[in-house]
Amino acid sequence: MRSVLSISLPEKVASDLEDYAKKTGRTKSDIVKESISLYLWEARFRKIRIQLTVNAKKAGIVSEDDLFKAVS
């Protein structure tokens, strides 16, 4: 199932997107889809990284040496 999303972009962003699409031979839609997917993946990664950092500090792992000792 597909969903259509309509967005409004500042003129400069729209122009840059148009130029990039032409230079790469891709559609603006494909570029935006890829950009959103990457943004969402990075947001999930940041959330997981924060939680892992909290858990590591609770376990006394605060340096790379501590991590190395814990996994070896």
Image: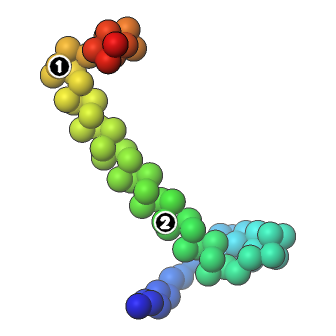
Amino acid type at circle 2 is Ser
Please rate how many residues cluster around mark 1, counting C-alpha atoms within 10 Å: few if below 14, some from 14 to 19, many from 20: few
- Residue 3: % across, % down: 43, 89
Q: Is residue 11 visible?
A: no
The answer to whether 2 appears left or right of 14 in the picture is: left
- Residue 46: % across, % down: 37, 45
Determine the residue positioned at 37% across, 8% down.
65
Determine the residue positioned at 64% across, 72% down.
31
Determine the residue positioned at 44% across, 90% down.
2
Say which label, 2 or 1, has the lower sequence index: 2
Q: Can residue 54 be seen in this view?
A: yes
- Residue 27: % across, % down: 70, 81
* Residue, disc 2: 37
Outermost residue toward the right in this view: 23
Q: In this view, does 45 lie above or below 29?
A: above
* Residue, disc 1: 59
Q: In this view, does 43 lie above or below 52?
A: below
In this view, the residue in front, 19 or 51, is: 51
The answer to whether 69 appears left or right of 23 in the picture is: left
Determine the residue positioned at 67% across, 79% down.
28
Q: Secondary structure beneath disc 1? A: loop
Q: Secondary structure beneath disc 2? A: helix
Please rate how many residues cluster around mark 2, counting C-alpha atoms within 10 Å: few if below 14, some from 14 to 19, many from 20: few
- Quadrant location of the N terminus in the rendered image: bottom left
In this view, the residue in front, 34 or 71, is: 71
Q: Which color scheme does this rendered protein use?
A: rainbow
